[in-house]
Image (cartoon, helix red, strand yellow):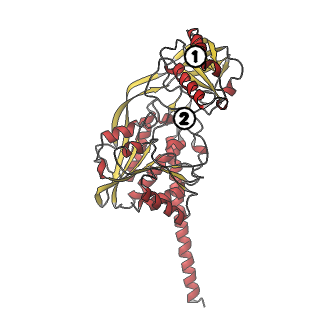
Amino acid sequence: MISTSFLLKTFVFLLLWTNFLFSTVCLAQDLTYAKEVIRNLCDESMKGRGYVENGDKSAAAYIATEFEKAGLKKYSKTYFQHFTTPVNSFPGEMTLFINGKKLKPGEDFLIDPGSPGISGKFSVVSFNADDLLKNEVWISKMKSAASKFIIVEAFDKTKYNSEQVKQLNEIISFLKYSKENPAQGTIIMTTDKLTWSGSTELYSTPSFMVKLESATEEIKSIEVSAENKFLKNHQTQNVIGYIEGTNKDSLLVFTAHYDHLGMMGKETMFPGANDNASGVSMLLNLVKHYAAQKPKYTMVFIAFAAEEIGLVGSTYFTEHPVFPLKKIKFLINFDLAGTGDDGIQVVNGKVYQQKFDQISKLNEEGMLLKQVKIRGEACNSDHCMFHSKGVPCFFIYTLGGIQAYHDIYDRPETLPLTEYEDYFTLLVKFIQTL
């Protein structure tokens, strides 16, 4: 005969095992959905979520569809808050030959994001660091650069003091952006990692950043074909939805920017898996989580456009809010959510020390992340626009792992999502305390 004690122990074991399996499945579903979101946002059809072939609009439409599936409510007829912004784009040719050798865009070189288009073959005038530190030398050389390209040779910064490095950077900026430079364009040789960005401005001449290892011989000629399109009033959109809580007077707001750098020419895409498809995936995972249970406070979810060109989307929202900003109890902004090997960084942690201590304590109790690192104020993502208006907020990003950032290598297949599940768990626990 099977004893009552044995049956009780078996029942408890099965209950615990079932709970474990259920918990594991739930977390796996979170991670599976995250990977799906990241993969979709980085798909070639999204064009890097930039301003070539309306990549930003495709991404916004996808997020709005996910909001609709989860049953989020709208503040207007659609989830979109439209606005316009100037932005430079590169929809067509993007080729660069140095001494007859064709370089690979994104891998060997980048065009400055504010560059106009250019096409032709040019001779060159070369400047080294010592030339640039002698005003009479570089000014004299610059006068002979008309109809040519200026080449700024790579230099070892450790061989110069801080004042000299500052002077070199200022002169290089002058050569790149000043209308007084008579050259057709500028090429900056570098040993640094190639890191691209976006621009709402259009400069008078083009500039390129070229990896030194891609052109090790003396440069004698270049041939270039780069097509730009400056959009004076490009219409883009924030995506906004909410879940109504039992307390409608206070709001918890969650944000992440969905835009990225788009295309540098018709063949070179910047996928932006970690920056910031990963943050959007965290936002949408929270949408799914809280859509399944009515929260205490109304929760607002905002996917911002145009963060990469100067926090344009969040600036527009805070100047044209769809609800009073004073109703925000707390805001959390997600960016770079795809690693976590070394834990997370909490911007504004020193400003809202009590809230930081709470999330840090929850992490220690749950033994979730390696560390929850504190940081003070930093205007480095969309939270900044809210913080400047007195809205209590954190900006959280993951630490460690891959170093791909603002380059062609920030892809879904290499994004580890190392601590994604524990990060999500910590967030849910923290949100319960707000």
- What is the quadrant of the N terminus in the image? bottom right
Which tag, 1 or 2, sits closer to the chain's start?
1
In this view, 294 is above or below 167? below
Q: Secondary structure at mark 2?
A: strand
Question: Where does residue 94 sit, x and y in percent of width and height?
Answer: 56, 22
Q: Residues within 10 Å of mark 1 (few under 14, many from 20)?
A: few
Q: What element does badge 1 sit on?
A: helix
Task: Tell me the residue at 29%/50% (across/down).
Answer: 326
How many numbered callouts?
2
Q: Which mark is residue 270?
A: 2
| Type of the residue with mark 1 | Asn
How busy is the neighbourhood of tag 2: few (under 14 within 10 Å), some, or many (20 plus)? Answer: many
Identity, as a three-letter code, of the amino acid under mark 2: Phe
Q: Residue at x 46, y 41 (%)?
A: 380
* Residue 355: image location, x then y, percent: 43, 58
Q: Determine which quarter of the picture holds residue 289.
A: bottom left
Tell me the mark number nearer the camera, choosing from 1 and 2: 1
- Numbered circle sitting on residue 135: 1
